[in-house]
Amino acid sequence: MSKNKSSESVKVVVRCRPLNRKEESNGPAGTIIQMDIRLGQVILRNPRAPSSEPQKTFTFDAVYDANSKQRDLYDESVRPLIDSVLDGFNGTIFAYGQTGTGKTYTMQGAWLDPEKRGVIPNAFDHIFTHISRSQSDRQYLVRASYLEIYLEEVRDLLDPNHGSARALELRESPDSGVYVRDLTSCVCKSIKEIEEVMNVGNQARAVGATDMNEHSSRSHALFLITVECSQPGPDGRKHIRVGRLNLVDLAGSERQAKTGVQGERLKEAAKINLSLSALGNVISALADGRSGHVPYRDSKLTRLLQDSLGGNAKTVMVATLGPSSQHYDETLTTLRYANRAKNIQNQPRVNEDPKDALLREFQMEIARLRAQLNHRKWRSKQKKDGQEDGESWERDGDEGTEGEDEDEGEEVEKEAEEYVKLEEQRLERETEAIRGDQFLLAEEKQRLLGEKERMMGVLRKEQEATEQLTAKYKAMESKLLVGGKNIIDHTNEQQKMLEMKRQEIADQSRSEREIQQQVLVQDEETVELRETFTSLQQEVEAKTKKLKKLYAKLQCIKAEIQDVNDEHVRSRQELEQTQNELTRELKFKYLIIENFIPPEEKNKIMNRLTFDTEEDQWKFQPLVPAESKSSQMKKRPASAVGYKRPISQYARVAIAMGANSRYRAENIMFLELDMTPPNTTSLDRSGEAESNQSHSVDSSPTKDRGVRKSRSWCQTPKSMASSSSNVSLSACQTAAAMAAQ
Ligand code: ADP
Ligand code: MG
């Protein structure tokens, strides 16, 4: 599995963007950064310090100033990494820096302007041009995914339901390390297709965000490209190498103000930079080299980049800076961060023949389809030969040797078509012959015609199946890119030469810088050993110079120590503040729980909770254990033993007394029809005296109406309830009268 076990350090380059219009209006005094491109050094001036204070110098693998071109950065610092990915290494490029310093500009740039295209579009060009120029015995499969991490949740940017989809989980496999489960991965066959993938993701990112600026400065975007390459090895077998490329645009590195926020907003604020501070801790732990534990598991980002930091990958970090004096503190923090990352050692190796290579699966599927097609071809050929009684069929239905794959599909299709055509003609001829045969009985004729019809149907079905198979085969095959075949390289010889020269220059300037940096280091160490002095005066002068130099260095280091201490104190204070706020929040929650949730309920909830270390979350266990669900559900409630449903004591007594108990507990009255014909009386409203009488008739209506009220089962014949209510009502009235007096 491994070819190259040597370790190499993370490459760190620094880029400073030009002053923007607002900063320009402050005048050139605003710039606090100087760069020595030849030596790869950044010199930072503290705008608040007196001019006597020495400036801070940092050395990196390369530095790019405000005049640098996207192309320079790519050719010098990124191209070698992409070449390694194409050779089967894992590669990572991440852009780190304060918001507005050019992370997105460096990674993506302005797509439409060829001069301003960033690392990602240039990498697309690079990968597909490489494939188009490689030998034809190589097969490639290129896949792309796009995700973002926002508030510690991983979201798939290529999922059409991006907004509503739930966060994805991280998983780990021994073969490919940490990966995102169920992440969409698109097979790309050309630059256009992969650019489309990128666009879809960028749009999803913009749509999901209410404030794009805020969102993009707080989320990490990861574009992942997997390049699988199969190539015949010296043993004659095909070997697959898998290169994975992570292109990461990190969230803005500026400190988020956490003071004064509470509740949900506090949790959010604590999460926003969690991944970044975890990244810082991982880098510190790795750069330190002494601490055994590297806290990869503290955040989603560090888990995903586990291989890129101290593992199996080649990594380039681009730290971006703004030249303006108002961001001095952030710029210094970024430079320190970047300086620390230089010390991380990785162990990159070629991923050869991993078990989960998709290309292998594709190749096997294609071989299987080809075998099926060949089998059909062989069958049709045999039939044809049988009819024509002609030449013999020598090649049997094997898969064919590798060299003649190319036109196999088309050849097979042609053969099949030819066979079907001949067969159809033959069947038609025979059908005609049957129709024309006058000696056959009508019945016999019908039977033979039916037979031919059936054969025709079978033939058509077979043809359809072959067509489907061919289409599937072609679709499958088209996903694989063959070196120098599927993509046509349009660059002419002159351009190719130009590219080569540019690469040579980039390589040269890189090695020149490395030598310069080495010379500088050696100079400082060995200067006094070589010098011999002719006079005492000269010796004093030289030694004074040396002393001055060393004194300046000492001052620098002292200032550095002071700075680091200050920063340490500041971050500790911030952490304490966060802790205080979280403790307050916790106390608040405790108060609610202790005072408003019954202890038994609290215990019940607490017994149900378990901690899921994989997702870093508390989770509820299911109420009913999955296996005993069915048996539990069958049990009847204990209160209803012997009855169909829970039943009241009163109803039980009523049942025991033998009366029909149904509904009686609810005290519902029965209404029955009285079938006796009603007595009709004619009302005589002539006299005044009778008006009183009519009143009395009205007051007892039930006696004479067609419907009479039946007694409720619990009512005594004397209507206990109503009489008692009357009593209580009259009692009330008397009480009220007495109160009035
Ligand atoms: P970030 O992603 O770090 O927040 P951006 O990439 O969005 O920052 O850059 C902020 C602005 O600065 C953009 O308008 C971008 O065009 C400009 N910019 C950044 N870097 C450069 C550069 N090297 N050259 C020219 N313009 C730049
Ligand atoms: Mg950005």
Image (cartoon, helix red, strand yellow):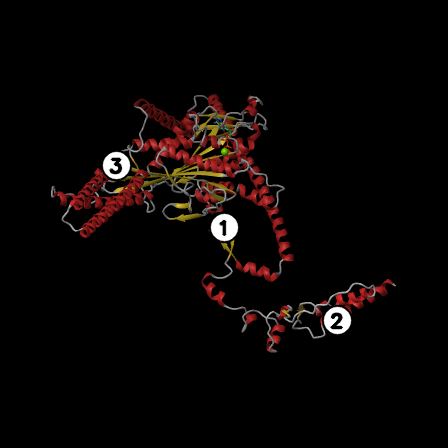
Kindly identify which numbered label has been placed on residue 555.
none
Question: Between residues 703 and 300, which one lies in front from this camera angle?
Answer: 703
Q: Tell us which disc is closer to us: 1 or 3.
A: 3
- The residue that disc 2 covers is 723
- The residue that disc 3 covers is 137
Look at the numbered disc 3 and say if its residue's Cβ is closer than 8 Å to ligand 1.
Answer: no
Mark 2 belongs to which amino acid?
A: Ser
Mark 1 belongs to which amino acid?
A: Asp
| Residue 95 at x, y percent in the picture | 46, 34
| Residue 521 at x, y percent in the picture | 43, 30
* Contact, mark 1 vs mark 3 (Cβ under 8 Å): no
Q: How many marks?
A: 3
Helix, strand or loop at label 3? It is loop
Query: What crowding class fits label 3: few (fewer than 14 Cα within 10 Å), some (14-19), or many (20 or more)?
Result: some
For the question of whether residue 342 can be seen, the reply is: no
Query: Which of pointers 1 and 3 lies earlier in the amino acid sequence?
Result: 3
Query: Which of pointers 3 and 2 lies earlier in the amino acid sequence?
Result: 3
Q: Tell us which disc is closer to us: 3 or 2.
A: 2
Q: Residue furthest right?
A: 741
- The residue that disc 1 covers is 616
Mark 1 and mark 3: Cα distance apart in space: 47 Å
Query: What crowding class fits label 2: few (fewer than 14 Cα within 10 Å), some (14-19), or many (20 or more)?
Result: few
Helix, strand or loop at label 2? It is helix
Mark 1 and mark 2: Cα distance apart in space: 70 Å
Mark 3 belongs to which amino acid?
A: Asp
Q: Tell us which disc is closer to us: 1 or 2.
A: 2
* Contact, mark 3 vs mark 2 (Cβ under 8 Å): no
Q: Is 254 above or below relative to 464?
A: above
Query: What crowding class fits label 1: few (fewer than 14 Cα within 10 Å), some (14-19), or many (20 or more)?
Result: few
* Contact, mark 1 vs mark 2 (Cβ under 8 Å): no
